[in-house]
Image (spheres, helix red, strand yellow):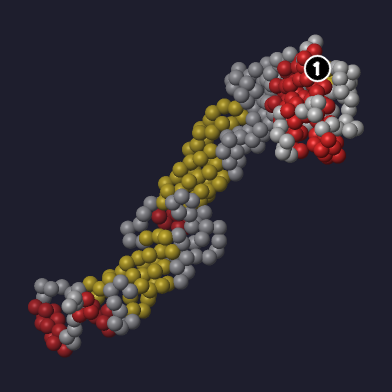
Amino acid sequence: MDKDYYKTLGVDRKATLADIKKSYRKLARKYHPDLNPGDKTSETKFKEIQEAYSVLSDPKKKGHYDQFGFAGDAPPRGPQYQTYTSGFEGFDFSGFGTSSFSNFFENIFGTTAQRTYQRAERGEDLHYTMKVGFMDAIHGLKTRIKLTRMVACPTCSGAGYMQKGGQQACPVCGGSGRSTIQRGSMRFSGTCPSCGGTGRTPGQECSMCHGHGLIQKIELISVRIPGGVNTGSKVRIPAKGNAGRMGGPSGDLFITIEAAPHPFFNREGSNIYVKIPITVPEATLGAKIEVPTLSGNTTIKVPPGTKSGQKFRIRAKGAPLAGKKARGDQFVEVSIVPPPFNDERTRELMRELEKISPQNPRKKMAIH
């Protein structure tokens, strides 16, 4: 082979078409004659890159080249090869992005204009931690909170510049927001680097917000916390975050809940747990007992022979599920309380009971 096209493009012989294209684009950008005016070495290098790519990017030519060592109907070689008149033919700038394109654009034309005018953009979200009582978390509440947030500057109405005299069309793009410039055989079109694509130039900077368009303000905000929240729950208050820039929408406020504990209710998700003491006669004979719930007292039936630690379920007496009509359940765990030991009559009855119904509840635990 009189020329190694793979070496010219800096790729391996097993390189995929995507790898070949990627390498070509990188090298073409580096050695293009319009980017290196008067540099004969770069011009020659660019011709070699074009020649190599025209062969390796064509499956038929590449196969012929790999098999016989020459490209068959490949483009002619030598100084007379002049087929790059279309500039970056087949070159894709979409991967550069706006910022990279602007940098590339400035490197070519010496443009140093900066984007002094911002586009409309959404405001930042704010986060707030609220401590609420146990019952407030269960039932929900309406309250007001003091919040420091950024709002539109009243002097310039959030524009960042003084309204007097208004804005003028950008002198670079003529108000279109896009710049199209041709250099040699190359044509570039993209977001105007002077106005940032707005098509307008800012007026005199606002003295109150110093061009930011926003100022800090302390506000009292009314919020509604729905029933069923718990520690770690987040409540979103739309449009109560920082105001947007240049007329953009406000961000949101996110309130993180910290619920206080309760003296005897324990909560796990939407279920409520409570421990209730019962007497020996109630446990032995059975009884109807009154137990507290989130919505007031209710009565449950304790069957005869109830053991300490036994649990009873009361359906739909738990906490509400946030955003739903359903509720969790309440679980009542009973604990048997022994009778007072300082009463002689009580002790006599206990001794009589022991004679009538002797038992050893630890018998199965004996180790032999």
The N terminus appears in which quarter of the rendering? top right
Q: Can you see residue 193?
A: no
Task: Please state which amino acid type lies under the numbered disc 1.
Answer: Glu
Please report the residue visible at 36 percent of the width from the left and 70 percent of the height from the top.
332
Q: Can you see residue 244?
A: yes
Residue 336 drawn at (x, y percent): 25, 73
Please report the residue visible at 58 percent of the width from the left and 41 percent of the height from the top.
252
32 on left or right of 327:
right
- Where disc 1 sits, the SS reads helix
The C terminus appears in which quarter of the rendering? bottom left
Please report the residue visible at 39 percent of the width from the left and 72 percent of the height from the top.
298
Quarter of the image holding residue 347? bottom left
In the displayed structure, 331 sits above or below 302; it is: above
58 on left or right of 142:
right
Residue 305 drawn at (x, y percent): 29, 82
Quarter of the image holding residue 74? top right
In the displayed structure, 80 sits above or below 347; it is: above
Residue picked out by circle 1:
43
